[in-house]
Amino acid sequence: MNNLVSVIIPCYNCANTIGRAIDSVLRQVYQPIEIILVNNNSTDETPEVLTSYQKLYPDKITVLNQPKPGAPAARNCGLYHAGGKWIQFLDADDELLPAKIEKQMQLAEANQADIVAGECLLKYTSENEATTIVRTTDKDIWRGLITSNLGITSSNLWRRATLLDINGWDEELTSSQEYDLLLRLLENKAKVVTDQLMNTVVHFSGNSVSKSTNVERKKEVLNNRISLRLRIKETLERQQMLTVRLSRIIDIYIYTEIIHYYNYFPDYAGALIRKHKLNVSVVRKLRLKAKNFLKSIRFLLNLF
């Protein structure tokens, strides 16, 4: 029985952080593990760092090159070269706690699962502040998918065969890639089990896509999130699983996301609200608008 876990790490200009990610894999209690480092057009010292690790661990580490830009393409490159039955994706600036893979392998085997959705600690850093948030998982799988509480790329464990069945990652998506992947897996009848332990640390900087200050990029992120929830609704309708409760959760999620971005492009956001005719109560709308208003005030106060 193949119990090898393939850890796939896309690497783009990550010379300063990749060592932390690789070392966290080398410290895993679970063995056997292979590490696949996919250089994705790096222009800094990343290739040299990857080569140095490969020389230190020639039987464990493989270095590949993927010229097509983007983490999804790099992940697919690693996926198709992987020898393991299970896949652990890891971003180059994130880290795994020592028991992560061991605990999730136990859950996967005990439940005959295809995906283990894990909790994680999010660390947001900028020039002025650092914030940490624990991101939990939802045992209600479809609700968790709708509300983005079904783990993230690095906190989950994935069965390789199940990923190959749906042709892996969508390399054209610019955001929401892991939840697009999860939706397609669920559409293909994959079984998800949730892990209530926090064994992954995810680092975000001011340069991340979802934190971009570029207005057009923010519109793209918002539209990808809305589009995904509409696809979830269509899937649930097609499978005769769309309840009033889940339909309302989808509408509330979409409305909340639009309000979150409202201050950046109010006319555009207003048009989205009118277009989608969302079933959200007046009371909830007022609460969300008030919360967004207070957030705006705090932001302005921090400028002075």
Image (spheres, grey):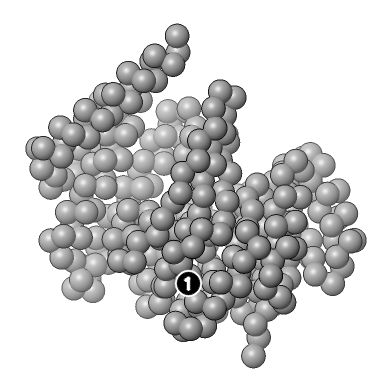
Residue 266, picture quadrant: top left
The amino acid beneath tag 1 is Ile
Mark 1: few, some, or many residues within 10 Å (few <14, many ≥20)? many
Displayed quadrant of residue 191:
bottom left
Residue at 20%, 71% (x, y): give it: 241
Kindly indicate the quadrant of the structure image that contains residue 6.
Answer: bottom right
What is the x, y in percent for residue 207?
57, 34
Which quadrant of the figure contains the C terminus? top left
Q: Residue furthest left?
A: 282
Depth check, front residue: 289 or 66: 289
> Above or below — where is 4 with respect to 89?
below
Secondary-structure class at tag 1: strand
Q: Residue furthest top?
A: 304
Residue placed most toward the observer, 196 or 166: 196
List x then y, in percent, for residue 190: 41, 76
In this view, 235 is above or below 291: below
Q: Residue at x 70, y 57 (%)?
A: 24
* Drawn side of residue 26 relative to residue 55, left or right: left
Q: Is residue 66 visible?
A: no
Residue 3 percent location from the top left of the image: 65, 82
Residue in view at x 60 percent, y 62 percent: 89
The answer to whether one can see residue 149 in this image is: yes
Q: Which residue is mark 1?
A: 115
Q: Residue at x 32, y 18 (%)?
A: 297
**232 vs 265: above or below:** below
Residue 102 in picture, x, y percent from top left: 61, 72
Labels in figure, total: 1
Image quarter (top left, top right, bottom left or bottom right) of the N terminus? bottom right
Q: Is residue 241 left or right of residue 207?
A: left
- In the drawing, does residue 252 fall left or right of residue 221? left
Residue furthest toward the bottom? 1
- The answer to whether 80 appears left or right of 50 in the picture is left
